[in-house]
Image (spheres, helix red, strand yellow):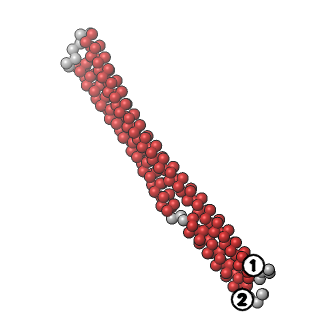
């Protein structure tokens, strides 16, 4: 059986369109998989950041407790030292020292709280950024359709081949 040029051209055009469709589908599938990995990584990072936030808050509470105990022992030591020397603590220098110890304790307590709040704030921004990264990748992934990409490549290749064939058929060459 002998094939005409038109039949051979149609067969090769179908093969070419099929290969273009396969390539476009594979590329879109790979791109879709890539965005799904980005989404999964961003969601995992959000979970890890939430754990970091809990740890920062826990660390802040531990620092506050350690600070409170340190000053409690310091004041007890000051009182015991003055008491062992029979110094009255109701006025004068001993009372001033106790009051200044209280002031320094309050300043340290506020510094610890501010540091903890700043760390938690930064981690919340980090978590928010991971959420945005996941949302953007999800939006991009939802616009990718491997079957649509394959269909469009197939049709584009067929139409291009049909145009080439029409150009050949109606030209002065054949």
Task: Tell me where residue 112 sits by quadrant.
Answer: top left
Above or below for 58 versus 127: above
Residue at mark 2: 170
**Residue 165 percent across, percent down from the top left:** 70, 82
State the residue at coordinates (65%, 65%): 23
Residue 9 sits in quarter: bottom right
The residue shown at (59%, 71%) is: 151
Helix, strand or loop at label 2? It is loop
Residue 136 x, y percent position in the rendering:
48, 58
Q: Residue furthest top?
A: 85
Q: Quadrant of the N terminus?
A: bottom right
The residue closer to the viewer here, 12 or 86, is: 12
Which image quarter: residue 89?
Answer: top left
Q: Residue furthest front?
A: 1
Gap between marks 2 and 1 measured at Cα: 17 Å
Q: Is residue 8 visible?
A: yes
Task: Name the residue that disc number 1 marks.
Answer: 8
**Location of residue 153 with respect to 94 vertically, above or below:** below
């Amino acid at each position: 059986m002998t094939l005409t040029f038109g039949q051979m051209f149609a067969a090769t055009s179908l093969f070419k369109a099929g290969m273009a469709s396969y390539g476009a589908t594979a590329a879109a599938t790979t791109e879709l998989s890539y965005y799904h990995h980005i989404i999964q990584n961003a969601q995992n990072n959000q979970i890890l950041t939430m754990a970091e936030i809990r740890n920062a808050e826990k660390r802040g509470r531990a620092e506050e407790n350690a600070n409170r105990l340190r000053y409690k022992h310091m004041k007890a030591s000051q009182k015991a030292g003055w008491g062992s020397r029979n110094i009255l603590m109701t006025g004068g220098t001993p009372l001033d020292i106790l009051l200044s110890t209280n002031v320094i304790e309050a300043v340290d307590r506020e510094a610890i709280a501010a540091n903890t709040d700043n760390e938690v704030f930064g981690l919340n921004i980090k978590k928010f950024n991971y959420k945005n990264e996941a949302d953007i990748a999800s939006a991009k992934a939802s616009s990718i359709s491997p079957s649509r990409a394959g269909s469009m490549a197939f049709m584009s290749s067929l139409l291009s081949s049909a145009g080439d064939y029409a150009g050949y058929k109606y030209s002065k060459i054949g």
